[in-house]
Amino acid sequence: MEKDKNLFAEKIVAGIKKHFPNPRIELNYKNEFELLIAVLLSAQTTDKKVNEVTPQLFSKYPTPQKLAQADINDLCKIIKPLGFFKRKSELIKKCAQKICEQFNGKIPSTLEELVQLPGVGRKTASAVLVNAFNKPAIVVDTHVIRIATERLKLSKEKDAEKIELDLAKFFPQKDWQFIANGFVLFGRYICTAKNPNCASCQLYNLCPYENKAIK
């Protein structure tokens, strides 16, 4: 049984690699501070839209210290295209203040410390760990939840943290960083919520999804 599970895990990774050999987060950033803020801003909007506002944001507020002192109204003007701009403006300012007060202006590099920051949950923290610090972690967003539960049946859980634990048990740690970005892109562009692209999917023959399109 364990051997079958390991083989299934290997085949999933191999299949997704055919679609995305070197999956990368689609947010633009130059350092861990920019990535953290960009991920926070990406809630309920697209990475593309975030990438359109962050150049101006980081040009004006390039460090946690600068952002911690930012005028909320100015932040609102910059990030207004993203929606929920007042809440997001307040959130990123509070996050920057906490970084300055508690972490001496440096972005923490552990899950336990990252989740102490305002607005930072496990998903955001894991994205920062994987992409900014090159550490193994699994990112569970809406795409990954759909793939792990409904499509590939890797978890029966509904809670994101429990799904993360199931994926961490299923895939060896050496694959976590690949899965973190690979699953997100796979769900975003191939195994979509509506009209999944089953015809071109490299996991088609492995996929137990009852409603997959017939080739």
Image (cartoon, rainbow, N blue to C red):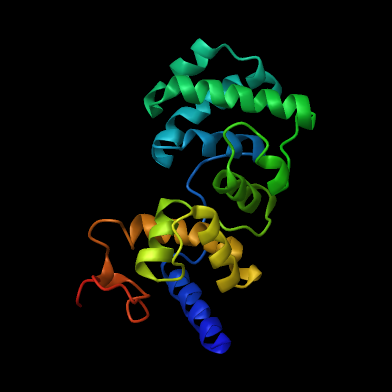
The residue closer to the viewer here, 210 or 31, is 210
Quarter occupied by residue 19: bottom left
- 33 left or right of 75 in image: right
Q: Position of residue 87 (x, y in %)?
A: 48, 23
Note whether 75 is above or below 189 in the view shown: above
- 143 left or right of 194 in image: right
- 92 left or right of 48 in image: right
Residue 62: in sight, yes or no?
no
Note whether 46 is above or below 189 in the view shown: above
Q: Position of residue 9 (x, y in %)?
A: 51, 77
Quarter occupied by residue 68: top right
Residue at (57% x, 26% y) in the render: 92
Residue at (24% x, 56% y) in the render: 194
Quadrant in which the C terminus is drawn: bottom left
Q: Position of residue 132 (x, y in %)?
A: 65, 47
Note whether 22 is above or below 209 in the view shown: above
Residue at (62% x, 23% y) in the render: 94
Residue 80: in sight, yes or no?
yes
